[in-house]
Amino acid sequence: MATLTRQDLNFGQVVADILCEFLEVAIHLILYVREIYPSGIFQKRKKYNVPVQMSCHPELNQYIQDTLHCVKPLIQKNEAEKVVMVIMDKEHHPVERFVFEISQPPLLSISSETLLSHVEQLLRAMILKISVCDAVLDNNPPGCTFTLLVHTREAATRNMEKVQVIKDFPWIVADEQEVHMEEAKLIPLKTMTSDILKMQLYVEERTQKN
Amino acid sequence: MDYLYLDNIDEFVNDQNKIVTYKWLSLTLGVHVNTAKQMLYHYLQQKRNEGSGTPLHATYLVSGKCVENGSKCHKVSVVREDKLNAVKAKMDVTISVHVYSVQRAELKDSSPLYNTDYDAVKENIKNCNKYSTIRCAAAVPMSSAEVQRAQEMALVPPAGKEISKTGLNENTSATPKPSAKQPAGIMGMFASKNASKSQESSKEVKTEQKDDSSLVETSKSKTASKANPMSNLFGKSAQKKADEKPNKSVKEETAASSTAPAIMEQSQTSPKSKIDIKDEQSKVSSALKVESKDTRNKTKRPEVVDSDDEKMESQQKKRRRIKKPQPDSSDDEVVPDSPPVPNVQTPSPKKQVKREPVSHQEESSEVKRRKRRRVLKSHTFVDEEGSFVTEKGYVSESYSESEEEPEPNSQAKDSSSLKQSFGKREEEKKEKREKKTSTANKPTKQPSIMGFFQKK
């Protein structure tokens, strides 16, 4: 029916909303499955018609929401290439990196009525894959922390700094050691392709975790 | 019987790292559910005997009779393998045990089990019990006229409820075609009804405690018969739950729809043992149209829970809808004022305070809005000598207007900061309370993360 282009900001907003909601759920789920935080702070909620574990801790939730709030404009303009969730051990060396590679097709056509339910189905599958990822990953050492990185295309962050999206929530250039991991094993988890969004999820895991 | 299926299962489990439930397997391979269960068992035995390769984990479905709090009940639960023997020992009579799923991952909770079956069942929704043994001649799909009528009637009464759907769900359910609407509505109902129906059926269990052995059978045979007895049976429970739905036809429909998934879900697990019922239920899709019930029970989860036991009897008290921070009806203060809002929640929350079998109950109980509860609070004050003293003590905290607490200011700042994030409703309540957690309660020090965890 309608053929929308990237310039159609409304549609970009829709995609960004969908993606940010998904990333929030995925991040919470990874925190639960990889046992970064005690499971007591998690509560079952429903998303995409299936139960997911979301944290109840206010500061944690706020942090994740603020992060994604800043990422959203980048996604809207299709400038975000990867969103990475890095899990680091006590010495701040990364042990695992969950990489969400995102790409959006330049020309979108919403021809199907069931587009969104199809996307929902694909996202559900991604959630399921995250839930079972502990089968392919080794256990993490205790006392891990996490951080979120965004890889952008070109120099999008320069614009971001000009438009400070959230005050008191500054973004800094990531340390080299967080971005690159030594002796990394690549474990693909899931790929999804749809009319509005393409996403690939894989994990880079350090061979020696302890 | 050829053994190709072993290779199939092996591929699913090891290569694709999938969770293989018996239901999913039966729909994927096109075999009867009992065959699927046997296939999984056989596969598990073979792999365990080989003793090679990656470790496999399995979950089992156990059903049997036991005595809970002095009353007999029929318990159906999905348990992890390591808890299997413990659960079996707790039951007086174990009626059936079979493999529920096989996977490589060690599951921390039961959500992926539901997720696995969701799409497979959704695709086959018109004949999702093709391979099961539950049949019911009375359960037939409603015509679209009936569906629309039911929806209109259902939309009118529940005024006080909000639909807590995500944006995506709204989009999917807003499709104009009724056929497209059916799957979304059905799946929503399916998901939400599973839990609520087991509550209703558990109510039957409670109300008809005449004969234990035929307890479940009685309820099932009753539901299997005509629509009128069904509605009468559910009349009590449905009435309690749905005061806002005086319509009998709506009730019948609820009854018909509700029994179908619940009984099917339960019976699918152990069909042989309940054969003497001779019940027949067919499509779930039959009467599951009531969107408003959808909304109320939207946030329900199906019967499968974490490794904790599933108790049919306690489900009615569990009231999962309260678990989720809904911005609507779980508000205790609002409940007595607005009759349309299901007021059965008022008695159940009180029981629910004690009956939280789920592991993260601590957090949930803090989320629940009770009228009264005793909370461990610490009071910090300056004593006669001018030194700071922090005392911990149980304080009865109330959400009503009555003054109870002597120390309003020292309301644990941790818990207050925690509550901030639990939705507007909570904060509205706080504002309503004339004293205590008013603006004077800005935390004077930054709440630490560990303080949060200690609040358990």
Image (spheres, coloured by chain):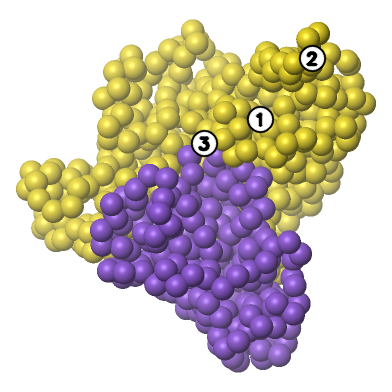
Chain colours: A purple, B yellow
Kind of residue at badge 2? Gly
Residue that carries the numbered disc 1 in the rendered image:
B366
From where the camera sits, is residue B231 visible? no
Cβ atoms under marks 2 and 3 closer than 8 Å: no
Q: Chain of mark 2?
A: B
In the foreground, B34 or B87: B87
User: As drawn, which residue projects farthest toward the front?
Assistant: B385
Kind of residue at badge 1? Glu
In the foreground, A153 or A161: A161
Callout 1: SS: helix
Q: Chain of mark 3?
A: A
> Tag 1: Cα neighbours inside 10 Å, few (<14), some, or many (≥20)?
some
Number of the front mark, 1 or 2: 2
Kind of residue at badge 3? Gly
Q: Return the x and y of residue B236 as percentages of the image width and height.
A: 68, 23
Q: Is residue B306 left or right of residue B144?
A: left
> Do tags 1 and 2 sit on the same chain?
yes
Give the quarter of the image for residue B398. Answer: top right
Residue that carries the numbered disc 3 in the rendered image:
A40
At x 62%, y 77%, the residue is: A75
Residue that carries the numbered disc 2 in the rendered image:
B386
C-alpha distance separating marks 1 and 2: 34 Å
Q: Return the x and y of residue B51 as percentages of the image width and height.
A: 9, 46
Give the quarter of the image for residue A43. Answer: top right
At x 73%, y 83%, the residue is: A9
Cβ atoms under marks 1 and 2 closer than 8 Å: no
* Depicted B395 relative to depicted B105: above or below: above
User: As drawn, which residue projects farthest toward the left?
Assistant: B50
At x 29%, y 18%, the residue is: B89
